[in-house]
Image: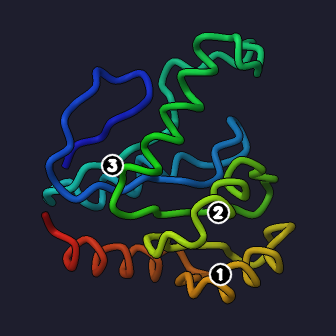
Amino acid sequence: MIVIKPDSLEQECNMTSVFLAGSIEMGLAEDWQTKTSELFKDTDVTFFNPRRDGWDSSWTQERINKEFSHQVNWEMDSLEECDIIFMNILPGTKSPITLLELGLHANSKKIIVCCPDGFWRKGNVEIVCSRFKIPLYNNFEEAVEKLKDMIKNSSK
């Protein structure tokens, strides 16, 4: 298992790759990305984890900000490049970027969504998933089982 983050030295990805999309909102969302990748520590899979170790909340969220622009472009490139998008949307967060990413990649046929009851826009997520036939789970463990199946079936 390999984990690539926006502030990692870039590594070539020649195995099944998974982008860990979903709630981050520093301080509001648990680090579920690390938890997820650790479940696959003995597997030939690359995880793109957008939870940047060196994130600085004082960065202006503007295109002209080099660090912010790098983060956003890295996420967009990695979402396009990956084989699977594992999306975990947590209650207690707003997750606007995750919702944007769901809309952008809804028709990609490579998304799994976990969205437990209590997420403030769960109805919207349910409708998008239904319309685009995206597997939707209320339970993290069940979503991870689906991820295991998708990894097994897409081995490079």
Query: Alpha-carbon neighbours of circle 2 within 10 Å: few (<14), some, or many (≥20)?
Result: many
* Kind of residue sitting beneath label 1: Cys
Secondary structure beneath label 1: helix
Query: What is the distance, in whole Å, between disc 3 and disc 1 at their CAs?
Result: 23 Å
Q: Position of residue 41 (x, y in %)?
A: 20, 54
Query: Alpha-carbon neighbours of circle 1 within 10 Å: few (<14), some, or many (≥20)?
Result: many
> Residue 98 lies in what quarter of the image?
bottom right
**What residue did someone put label 2 on?**
102
- The structure residue drawn at horizontal position 34% and vertical position 24%, both measured from the top left corner, is 8
Up-down relation of residue 38 to residue 2 (above or below)? below
* Kind of residue sitting beneath label 2: Leu
> Residue 125 lies in what quarter of the image?
bottom right
Dot label at residue 113: none
Q: Position of residue 77 (x, y in %)?
A: 46, 40
Q: Earlier in the sequence, mark 2 or mark 3?
A: 3
Q: Quadrant of the C terminus?
A: bottom left
- The structure residue drawn at horizontal position 19% and vertical position 36%, both measured from the top left corner, is 12
